[in-house]
Image: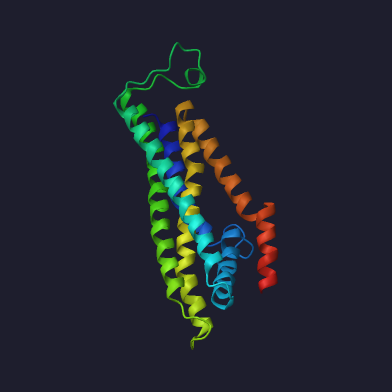
Amino acid sequence: MDALNIAAITFFILVWIAIEPLMALGWPRPNDSLSVDMVRVRSAWMRETLTRDNNFIGDAAILGHTINSASFFGSANLIVIVGLSGALFMEPNYGNGNGLIAMFAAKDPAWLFQTKVLLIIATLLRGLSDFIWAVRQLNYCLAAIGASPSRQEERDITAWTEALTMVLNPALRSFSVGVRSYYFTVAAAFWFLGPIPLTLATVLGVGLLIWRQSWSDTAKGILAIRRLLD
């Protein structure tokens, strides 16, 4: 592997590892990030769950939909991983030399081709593990909500709200991490076009992710809701 490929894959891995801790801290806007604002919104949701009169039915339906979504994404990841695994036993073949990959990529040796496939599989495996963990945590959250006391019982609303939020936030954070893994799966696929496309795709993917988390219309709307809650 030449120096340019080594530099590109090193940059990709460093960004891939660093992005989630930075996102959890709200970087680059720690006070106005979608990730940070949603923590406050979920806390308000759990407080409403404890005080409304509909016996948790609507809240259970929302969480059930999220569980189904995480299960769907996890199943899709697994199918793609199984399909890509077959490519590990194939010799690289760029066709007759007229395709897009053949225009930009060198005729890779088998081990480099397999390394590129493994990188894509690795990003999908991370997403799969996050979706599986999200499903488990959401089931715990449903059980915790079901175990919470009714309005007729003596209870500490603040303590129960904090406890339920502590269960809900990691669950939905895991789901978000799984979704964000697709940005890196797409970037990893660009390695087949060469190290420079891999680097550019990584930068563009992270840039798009940061914009959506901090400056998109959704981020602005969630910020407005958080300010209303505060």
Tell me residue 47's x, y (percent): 56, 75
In this picture, is 129 found above or below 42? Answer: above
| Furthest-left residue in this view | 89
Any part of residue 203 in sight: yes
Viewer-proximal residue, 65 or 93? 65
How far from the left and from the top, in percent, is residue 9?
A: 42, 38
Residue at 42% over, 32% down: 5
**Of residues 199 and 77, which is closer to you in this image?**
77
Report x, y in % for residue 13: 42, 44
- Residue furthest top in the image: 96
Rendered-image quadrant of the N terminus: top left
Against 125, residue 58 (above or below) is below
Seen at 59% across and 75% down, the residue is 52
Is residue 14 at all visible to an observer of this figure?
no
Q: Can you tell which quarter of the image residue 218 is in?
A: bottom right
The residue sitting at 49% across, 65% down in the picture is 169
